[in-house]
Image (spheres, rainbow, N blue to C red):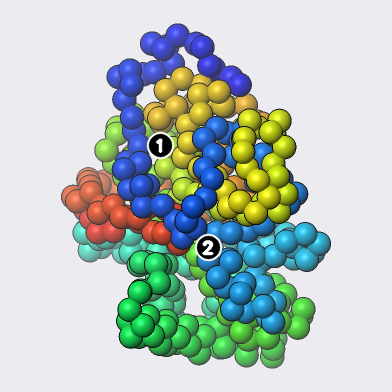
Amino acid sequence: MTNQGSPQTADCPFHEGEDHRKSAAASVGGGTVKDAVQTYTFDAARAVLRNQSARQAGFMAEQVGKIGSATRQPILFLEGEAHRVQRSATARFFTPKIVTTRYRGLMIRLSDDLVRRFRACKRVKLDDLSLELAVAVAGDIVGLTDSDPQGLAARLDVFFTGNFDPPKNFIKAFARFLHQQYLVLRFYYKDVAPAIRSRRKQRKDDVISHLIDQGYNGREILTECLVYGAAGMATTREFIVMAAWHMLSNDAIRTAFLEGDEHEKVAILEEILRIEPVVGYIYRRLHEDLPTTEGGAQGVRKGDAVAVDVRAANTDVAAFGTCPMQIQPGRKVSAKYGNAGLAFGDGEHRCPGAQVALQETCLFLERLMQVPGLKLERAPDLSWNQLVTGYELRNCVITCD
Ligand code: HEM
């Protein structure tokens, strides 16, 4: 607990009670797990995520698990020892040193190129630029580098948007199944298979090479690539647009971002992500009763699905102090909560790509925000993605002189 209880006027530079969240209204869209018990406080949310008996129930894990029980599961669906082994084997792709050396150069090159193209044509959809950046950076970490980058972005984009409720009508359900199969095969043959072929000839330092070493087959590598697509690319793409939208509609935030050093810039991005988490609910199924002492989450029984409400946790006054719905550059948050709260999850599945996402967003936006005459011509359309349980921002048009 930190600045809780400080005088409202000193802590809230904005109007008392003002709510900066742009995506809150869309969050009623919920997710793919029905009848889940919901958490409300930060402590209850974290207690569920850290509970040893909690199993992944989001990202369609329970449906996918049933269908593909003979194949090895992707990292997001693994549990216990198998999960620990994969996490430590892939940790080297996410160390602070690698992020600030190998990937930083790539992020700067990509950001410079995107900003140069924007300045040349003067009017772009920001969500197209952010997709290209997020796919290229995560694609490099995964090893999806043997197909055309713009085609790869478009082929991945189709998986993460849409309605995930199964159609009741059999014909429609079958037609959707066939279409999904076509999209998966197209992604496999155009992007994943060429990457596997080239790494079988010459191994590289990326996730696909690691999976080949482990004896993963093509189908298993495909599934892992789809997980990285949803967890790493779709999320970062949305966050970049959200952060830019806040900066372009609030001069105080934009100025604080531009004037801060890199550490302060990242802290502002975390503060934006705290109130605008891209993953709104993290689902778990508990295999034991949750002790009532753990974080005050009561009545969670063995077998229950729990919707960990990241939005509620991240605006808990007990953790983040007064005016929790506002973006306050320089907000003092105790390390035990973290500046971004639970936006990157917690416990054994906590996002390994957090630093990658924050650094690429920072490097891109610091360049973009300095473009002369930069304006938001059209605020993005806001919709809700049930798979990621997060906002989707489309048709965000920016212009410059
Ligand atoms: C703003 C951007 C991002 C957000 C908000 C985000 C959020 C999250 C969250 C909440 C989880 C935990 C899911 C759960 O516990 O069920 C997660 C897991 C994961 N994320 Fe991220 N992520 C982002 C960027 C990235 C990037 C850039 C990468 C990789 C390049 C990445 C790779 C992963 C992977 C592999 C997992 C699964 C980890 C595991 O199961 O052990 N994420 N992410």
**How far is the residue under mark 1 from the one under mark 2?**
36 Å
Q: Quadrant of the N terminus?
A: top right
In-front residue for pair 205/353: 353
Q: Could you tell me which residue is drawn at 36 percent across and 47 percent down? A: 28
Quadrant of the image occupied by residue 217: bottom right
Q: Give the x, y percent position of residue 194.
A: 56, 88
Can residue 139 be seen? Answer: no
Residue 142 sits above or below residue 244 on the image: below
Three-letter code, disc 2 = Phe
Residue 205 sits above or below residue 130 on the image: below
Q: Could you tell me which residue is drawn at 35 percent across and 67 percent down? A: 162
In-front residue for pair 133/20: 20
Three-letter code, disc 1 = Leu
Q: Is residue 394 left or right of residue 258?
A: left
In-front residue for pair 380/93: 380
Which label sits on residue 59? 2
Ligand 1 visible in quadrant: bottom right
Q: Give the x, y percent position of residue 165.
A: 39, 67
Q: State yes or no: Cβ of the residue under disc 2 lies below 8 Å from any atom of ligand 1.
A: yes
Q: Give the x, y percent position of residue 349.
A: 66, 54
Q: Could you tell me which residue is drawn at 76 percent across and 80 percent down? A: 213
Quadrant of the image occupied by residue 79: bottom right
In what element is the residue under mark 1? helix
In what element is the residue under mark 2? loop
Q: Give the x, y percent position of residue 30.
A: 41, 52
Residue 301 sits above or below residue 113 on the image: above
Please report contact status of discs 1 and 2: CB closer than 8 Å, yes or no.
no
> Can you identify the residue that label 1 sits on?
258
Mark 1, residues whose alpha carbon is within 10 Å: few (<14), some, or many (≥20)? Answer: some
Q: Could you tell me which residue is drawn at 30 percent across and 19 percent down? A: 15
